[in-house]
Image (cartoon, rainbow, N blue to C red):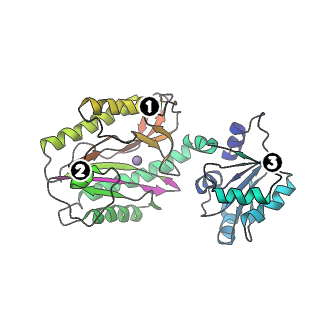
Amino acid sequence: MTRVERFKKSFFNDKTSFDACLVTSRSNRFYLTDFSSSDGIVLLTTDKSYLIVDFRYYEMAKSKVSTPFEIILADGRFSDAVEPLFNKHCIKRIWIEDLEMSVSTLEIYKKRFSEMEFLYIGNALTEQRAVKDEREIELIKKAQKITDSAFVHILNYISEDKTEKDVALELEFFMRSHGSDGIAFDTISVSGAKSSLPHGTPSDILLTKNSFITMDFGARFGGYCADMTRTVVLGRASDKMFEVYNTVLEAQRLALCKIKSGVLGSVVDAAARDYIYSKGYEGCFGHSTGHGLGIEVHESPSFSPNYKISIPEGCILSVEPGIYLEGEFGVRIEDIVVVREFGCENLTNSPKHLIEI
Ligand SMILES: [Mn+2]
């Protein structure tokens, strides 16, 4: 079954007459068509699928996008291009991506197609995207492999004459020159006291001896993201640094042990969080234990306190507990895993003991 067929089957049951769906977001268009464009529209009707693109993408789409999609050239506004298709298929009800479409775009459509009923698909497509097929898993594995090799490389690069920005750039350059199509997100490389900022920005400060460096980075391959974090020490770690590091490491191990298909996201989160809090670090771990990833680096589902929903087999999520001591230092360790029936498959193969450089 194609992704389009699965989408129609799972979402548009007998109770909800289908008519048509307008898919406008970049990631969902890519998911359905396997074609990436900064702009465009997918229009699904009961029996036809259209990809509408502008001139910049038309030739490429014609050669790359396969059936069932018919490629339509938008010569002007997209709302002009869909009108004849709406008429042809007698569309009276149109489902839209309410989580993605801007208010102003919706207003344009509502004004232009004032007789039409607009319905919201909510998270139907993102829920479908959460469960990866084997091809998607292979692409993420490949992206993570490139990311793992960048970590090996950076260990030989880190030194006192390098800045946080140098480290970020070197990670990115390595990934790009070893098969990555780009980076999955802006690289984080924070050192010393700045390592307590979970999403700090790399700056021009030089790395300092006997302090932590946290690096959070990921390659992109075939449209899919990898994501990993490691905290290492330049020089020697103090007893406290060791203690905090090993607490995070054990929290991650406990979370990883909980993962299998059907587990509630909140249960995996609690495994890491309860351990960290029990060691006296309550208030020092203020983010989720993990997030889904795929076409986007943050997507459904999630390992977080409020996610009391079971995680299906085939989801890929990060497992990334951390401890952040304001003004002092921080530690985060992040792997990505595939949820399997009786456990999880860890896609990250980099060492996790505390590395002193
Ligand atoms: Mn992450």
Q: State whether the magenta stretch is mostly helix, strand or loop.
A: strand
Which of the 4 image quarters holds residue 133? top right
Q: Residue 334, can we see it?
A: yes
Earlier in the chain: of badge 2 and badge 1, it is 2
| Horizontal and vertical percent position of residue 170 | 32, 64
From which residue to which does the magenta span run?
207-224
Q: Which residue is mark 2?
A: 232
Number of residue marks: 3
Q: Are marks 3 and 1 in contact (CB under 8 Å)?
A: no
**Residue at (83, 52) in percent of width and height:** 115
Question: Label 1's element?
Answer: helix
Horizontal side, residue 20 vs residue 223: left or right: right
Q: What amino acid is labelled 3 in the image?
A: Asp
* Kind of residue at badge 1: Ser
- Labelled disc at residue 47: 3
Residue 266 on image: x %, y %: 44, 31
Give the residue drawn at x 50%, y 50%: 139
Amino acid type at image mark 2 = Val
Taking the spot 34% from the left edge, 33% from the top edge, the residue there is: 272
Q: Nearer the viewer, residue 343 or 238?
A: 238
Residue corresponding to mark 1: 266
Disc 2 element: strand
> Is residue 219 covered in magenta?
yes
Label 2, label 1: how far apart the Cα atoms are: 29 Å
User: Relative to residue 109, is residue 161 drawn left or right?
Assistant: left
